[in-house]
């Protein structure tokens, strides 16, 4: 497992329909004070060139494409992501041990090896949702099971909700990254997220990195909204 700096703790999820508003926001950001996430929407619209542009500006870029396929396909996709110079990539833990191990081993052959993490249970899913797709138990039970599997597979961390961070932490040690979307300042709308916590509560509960999108990107003044979140966590080590 690669030791990683947990600071800056905020990863801004750039979920925009075009490059212009994203670049407008980024123009006021400092790579030393926040990281960026490119997800399915922007990657599908703008492709690898957009990702390389952000990397070229000095940002740690989390390419959040949540690969889920047979081991060979996922490993090749992770290697393609690594070629873009990104800081972190992810897969779905439910793709299984062989898939995660194959992806990790493939990345280990490369000169630039991004961090590799796995999604446990999407933060938009609640108890009823996961029962409907056939998962037994509460969301936290499934997060714990998949976090253990991810840890055993030698990955660098997991995506989970901040609600589960305290239960997962003792099972995986301090260096295993807990990357948490489902983060909402107290005044923000919950949107389609079901398992949420405020930024400061998330860190106090054991989250390492906070993925925050709409509370920043959909705000009237995104920069102000980000500044407020940064102030909220400023007293937390590395915040
Ligand atoms: O379980 C997950 C995994 C990924 N995400 C992604 O994080 C951001 C959250 O955006 P908000 O606007 O702050 O809700 C988004 O890009 C998701 O694709 C997640 O929310 N939950």
Image (cartoon, helix red, strand yellow):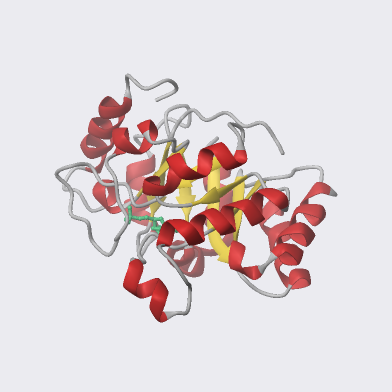
In the rendered structure, the answer to whether residue 3 lies left or right of residue 136 reads right
Q: In which quarter of the image is residue 48?
A: bottom right
Q: Residue at x 14, y 44 (%)?
A: 187
In the rendered structure, the answer to whether residue 135 lies left or right of residue 212 reads right
Res 49 seen here? no
Res 95 seen here? yes
Outermost residue, front direction? 137
In the rendered structure, the answer to whether residue 43 lies left or right of residue 20 reads right
Location of the C terminus by quadrant is: top left
- The picture places residue 177, in percent across and down from the top left corner, at 56, 40
- The picture places residue 141, in percent across and down from the top left corner, at 47, 58
Instruction: Give 172 or 87, whichever is nearer the viewer.
Output: 172
Q: Quadrant of residue 112?
A: top right
Q: Does 89 sit above or below residue 156?
A: below
Location of the N terminus by quadrant is: top right
- The picture places residue 18, in percent across and down from the top left corner, at 37, 62
Looking at the rendering, the quadrant in which ligand 1 lies is: bottom left
Instruction: Give 128 or 52, whichever is nearer the viewer.
Output: 128
Instruction: Give 103 or 206, whichever is nearer the viewer.
Output: 206
Question: How many marks do you count on the picture?
Answer: 0
- The picture places residue 12, in percent across and down from the top left corner, at 39, 45
In the rendered structure, the answer to whether residue 213 lies left or right of residue 78 reads left
Q: Which residue is drawn at 47% across and 50% down?
A: 37
Q: Does 64 sit above or below residue 133?
A: above
Q: Which residue is drawn at 42% across and 28% down?
A: 33
Outermost residue, right direction? 109
Instruction: Give 105 or 33, whichever is nearer the viewer.
Output: 105
């Amino acid at each position: 497992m690669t030791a990683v700096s947990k600071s800056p703790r905020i990863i801004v999820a750039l979920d925009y329909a075009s490059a212009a508003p994203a670049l407008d926001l980024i123009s006021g950001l400092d790579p030393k004070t926040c990281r960026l996430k490119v997800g399915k929407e922007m990657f599908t619209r703008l492709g690898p060139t957009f990702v390389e542009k952000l990397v070229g500006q000095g940002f740690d870029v989390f390419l959040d494409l949540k690969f889920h396929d047979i081991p060979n396909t996922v490993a090749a996709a992770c290697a393609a992501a690594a070629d873009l110079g990104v800081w972190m990539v992810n897969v779905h833990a439910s793709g299984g041990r062989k898939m995660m191990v194959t992806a990790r081993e493939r990345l280990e052959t490369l000169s630039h090896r991004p961090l590799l993490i796995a999604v446990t249970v999407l933060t938009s899913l609640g108890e009823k949702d996961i029962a409907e797709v056939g998962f037994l138990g509460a969301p936290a039970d499934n997060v714990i099971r998949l976090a253990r599997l991810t840890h055993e597979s030698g990955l660098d961390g997991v995506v989970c909700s901040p609600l589960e961070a305290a239960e997962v932490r003792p099972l995986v040690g301090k260096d295993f990254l807990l990357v948490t979307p489902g983060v909402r300042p107290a005044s923000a709308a919950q949107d389609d997220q079901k398992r949420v916590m405020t930024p400061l509560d998330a860190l106090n509960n054991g989250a390492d990195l906070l993925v925050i999108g709409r509370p920043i990107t959909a705000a009237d003044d995104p920069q102000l909204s980000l500044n407020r979140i940064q102030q909220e966590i400023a007293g937390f080590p590395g915040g």
